Amino acid sequence: MEALTNLKVKQRPQDNFFLGLLVKDTFAQRFLGPSANERKVLELRSRACRFLNCGDRICFLSIRPREGRFILGILEYRQCITIPLGQMSRYRDLHRLSEQEAAEFEKDWEGRNGADSQVYGWEFQLVTSFDPPPRLEFVKCEVWCWFPSFLVRETTAGATKEEEQRLVGIARKSSACSLPEPSPKFRRMQSGNGSEGSKTIEDSQSPSVQESPLKQDVACTCLLVSATEWNALTGGVCDALLRPRSTTSFGTDLHVLVQTSEGHRVSGTMCVGATIQVSWEDESTKDLCQTVYSKEQVTNMKAAKEVWRWEIQEISMFDTPHMAKFVDVAPRHRHQVFTAKIQDLRPVPAAVPMRLDLTETAQYFSHLMKPADKIALQRTFKNLCKSRGGNGVIRVGTTCSGTDVCITVLKQTVEYLNKTEETDIRIDHVFSCELNDQKRGFLLAEHKPRHCFGDVKVFKEHGGHDYVTGTYVEINEESCGIDLLLSGPVCTQLSRLNGQRKDAAGCYDAQEEEIAGVSGETYHFGFKKVVEILHPALAFYENVKAVTEKTVDNFGKEQPPGVKVYTILDSRNYCLPQRRNRVWGIASLNDGRVSEKEKAHCFSACLESLRSNFQFDLRTNFPDRRKEQVKPGRHTDLVSAAMKDAFGDLGMFVDCSSNGPSRLIAAQGVVPCITRSHPVYSVELGRYLGPQDFLNAQGLWSSAFTDSVYTSILADKNMAQSFAGNSFSTTVVQAVFLTSLTMFESSWQTLCPRGASSCNQLAVPPPARLARIGKKRKAPEYDHLIPVPKKSVKPSQRLRQHKRKVPGQDLRKCSTGKKPVASLWEKENLSCPQLVPIALKMMAAYDKAVEDGEKHPAKKVSRMKGFYRCCIYKWKKSREREKWTLLCRACPRIAKKHRELPDVMRDFMGGCKKFKSRAPDKTDTEWTQILPPELTALISEAVVERIETGEELDYSYVASALSVGIDLWNHALTALTTSLDVGGERFQERVLKELNDDFPEAESESEIKKALENITARLRSLKKVKLTSKDGLFLKQAARLCKACGIAPSDNNKPGKHLPYEHVAMRKVRDWVRYQCESGKIHEQMVGNFDQTWTLSFTPRRRSLQVKPFCSIKSPHMRRLRHNIERCLGLPLTEAMGSDSVMEVQPAAISGGCVAHAPVDMYRIPHTCTTLSWNDGDLGRLYITCRNDHLSEAQRMQLNKDHCVWGKLLALPIKKV
């Protein structure tokens, strides 16, 4: 035992852990050769050994199939050798490999890692061996394994004391061993058997059963890791994890949940130390990525925003990992610390469903129930046999339930309960309600209800058309009485995916006459009204989770949630691979025994007991099909974003209908909530989900339908997905139905006859009636005296201050605010337009009477036609102030449009502004943004000059010309100001002579001086233009110049003057031609295609003028513009421009490819191209039409003669446009 003194140990507060090397038994026996020369001394591994120093001793373990792990001996570590794959033959003898084994190893390693890869050889030397070897109690180990000391137990009976000490020597301290004391847990197990010499741990006293590390109903801090990460941590390969976010649980023991194919396994606890943001250039990070994570995971991590390294301080493994089949773990918690209740750590029930069948899921849910709930279920179900006169019938009605698959769920659940309880209860489908014709046909073919209605409004009217009988049916308890109602009101307007949720806010609380929207109608008439009319014993309600949230309507008022007592159920917790959160509510008949709060609590608790994370195998839910590539574009972006967020986890299902990665809808291991049309891509399956996949995710398995109906649903992919998106989750309906049988026993008892069960007796007996012993004499009749009413004096009340109401927020919700006042035109126009001149004439007569000094001028016009007081008294002052008579005569349209004189017309009509402008007064800098008329005229002249030469212009050229013109104007104005300041009167005289070459001599000096002052004042009034291409006003000025010059954007990619393809006339033409071809009157090849296109539609060339300093302007048009500005301002000419200079005409740029009609010359003259071609593509005729004044008759004949192929006229004159 002296060899154990240096054994590698990892101490914990309670236990000691030893390090061991795990090797297959075949290779392990080679370490135990008969002599030192024949023993194996080298172990080949894929990773370097970084956890041992030379001289460290570790345990040596072997794997024996169906027997377990055994400790064969102690090894001493020497060194780690790097071996290139090409030099493996040199180290083959040290590893004790045969030639065949070495060849197979090299071939396999080269295929996985390449020919240039390398392996690592760990050199050990055998120190001692155990015979017989002690057995190790451990579930699973990888390359390295830390294991607690108390897991070693005796495997042979009748061993001597020395042998026993050798068997458990690594766990016990003796006089010849320096190992630490055995753990307290090991000592308790020894003393529990009554003998310290006994090392056997009996199954009934397993520490994992007696002292569970997790407590029920206590929230535990958990972390979800992969099996590879956990094996690397426990094996000593690494001491850190990579996660996309930091953690706040420093120094806290986290329960580790390992993801396996069988479920989640609670394997131990760990303590996280510091967190460090990852630097990919760090050597430790590179080693961690190489040893633990795959290449794909590393690529996805590098694409994330930030990655953190979690340093693991301590790890403690449970002696027996707990298979947590009932752990509430959401996939979104994959990479962060979360808190959850691990409620049940019991083994998997024996009733786990093996097939996609509702009967097996019913058996599974019944096994999950608590014993008390099972007894209540049996009692309720047996009492139901006495309902309906002993026939045992449950009458069911459905409204807005999608596919009515809930009827199939109830039938198969009752069928299972009939077998187990030996009863005979059946489901009677009374009525369904479906507005969609296609779905209604499916309901009639599959479920065959007694009545089938269309719109839910039939319950409001207490009757409607029945699609089964084809007659009108009254809806009452006699004809349509039910015991159970299942309703799923439309969720379209309430869903978070709907951007107009505000329109439906408060639809559940609205009065019947104010109901608006499909969601409100289906709830009020399809659920609430049915309960009021038919009084079922129970009513189930299902809708989206958003119905429980407060919403703000269009008026800004907060509306309360639609439902207040509910339970939110997720389909993935009930054996379905789908994340579908739905609100389930239940209404029951109240018998007064149990309060509503207690019923709701019991209902939620029972549903909670049926929850589990059991899922069918992936290939069972989603059958194998041909793989598909992700569609390029948005689908590829969404899948890539989901993979980055999940660190390359292949179990992702991505909803490819999101607007972008910012609104990603994806789930791990389960399908996101299924809708009617959203495509879903599975990364692990490598394809899009098909019709059968969507149906299986909702529990709409083939066993729930007849073969013919199921085949017809799968034939139409859109219909199958629509059915799945609008349907109930079958297993959730099953769980709710079983829970109702358990928790609402008193409501179900109302179906039984009186006296059948004690449950029907009221808890509080009715009060006893007192019998009337003697009859009282009738009172005599007296005359009824009616008192004289007194005048009630109403007490004086204090007048309230008027508070202005806001439309839509105060009591006047329907008010639209202050109504517009009638205009002067409307008041004077009255109801007949002919009265306007009469009113004007009347006002003129009134003004004349005032001028004549009449004492009562109104009497002069009171008898005139159309007289009313307003036009004389109320509006007289307004008419005079605003000159309304002049406005009505000059601008009748403006007078009709406005109530008063517009502010824009008050300046030049001599009226003051009625309202002061809120805008600040214009400063001098703002006026400089207006183009001077001289500059506008010069730029327009330059643009028109280019147009007249035949060159094609566009908006970009005009904007460039405007920018250059403004620069030239400001430059010339600066030179002019300088000349005025320096030259004085000489410059003024020169300007005066240049403006008028024939300037006569003035008669006096005063006239000359006055003229010079006027010129100076005029030149001083010119201001610089402060406009840049970035200003909004600059764009407006450029657009105005384009409009003034007749430049408008045009495009020839979509020629007009055509009727749409689906036009009625085009359809009739195609039908007539098809009929003539089919009847044989016309040969198909002789059918021609007639097409006419306006060739003047084209896209001008877009370009921008690159302006250089003013002295080096090369464009002749810009040079001419500069010349004109200098002449206008009387400045020295930079360059003399002769009037006979030739303008260069640049050809127009044509875009549109083969569709464009080129060349486009004289584009302002309308001309068209008309073709007649045969059905095989050959051109029959081509006609060109143009304006009649564009070509002379001689030119037209010459063109036909030179270019006509068949001798027909191609150029036809048309009227002038």
Image: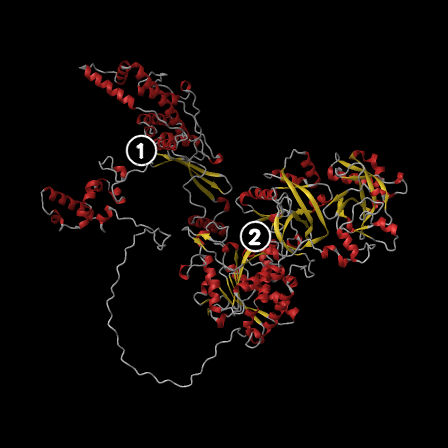
Residue type at mark 2 is Cys
Ranked by sequence position, the earlier of labels 1 and 2 is: 2
Q: Which residue is mark 2?
A: 673
Residue located 24% across and 46% down the image: 825
764 vs 839: above or below? below
Q: Are marks 1 and 2 in contact (CB under 8 Å)?
A: no
Which residue of the protein is positioned furthest toward the front in this rendering? 175
Q: Residue furthest right?
A: 35
Depth check, front residue: 356 or 414: 414
- Residue 637 appears in view: yes
Q: Residue 496's x, y, as percent?
A: 50, 51
Alpha carbon of mark 1 to alpha carbon of mark 2: how far?
60 Å
Residue 249: image quadrant is: top right
Give the camera-side residue of 750 and 1002: 750
Does dot 2 land on a helix, a strand or a loop?
A: loop
Disc sitting over residue 921 in the figure: 1
* Number of residues whose C-alpha sits closer than 10 Å to that of mark 2, classed few (under 14), some (14–19) or many (20 or more): some
Outermost residue on the bottom side: it is 774
Question: Could you tell me which residue is drawn at 89 percent across and 39 percent down?
Answer: 36
Q: Is residue 117 left or right of residue 411?
A: right
Q: Is residue 420 above or below residue 132?
A: below
The foreground one among 939 and 839 is 839
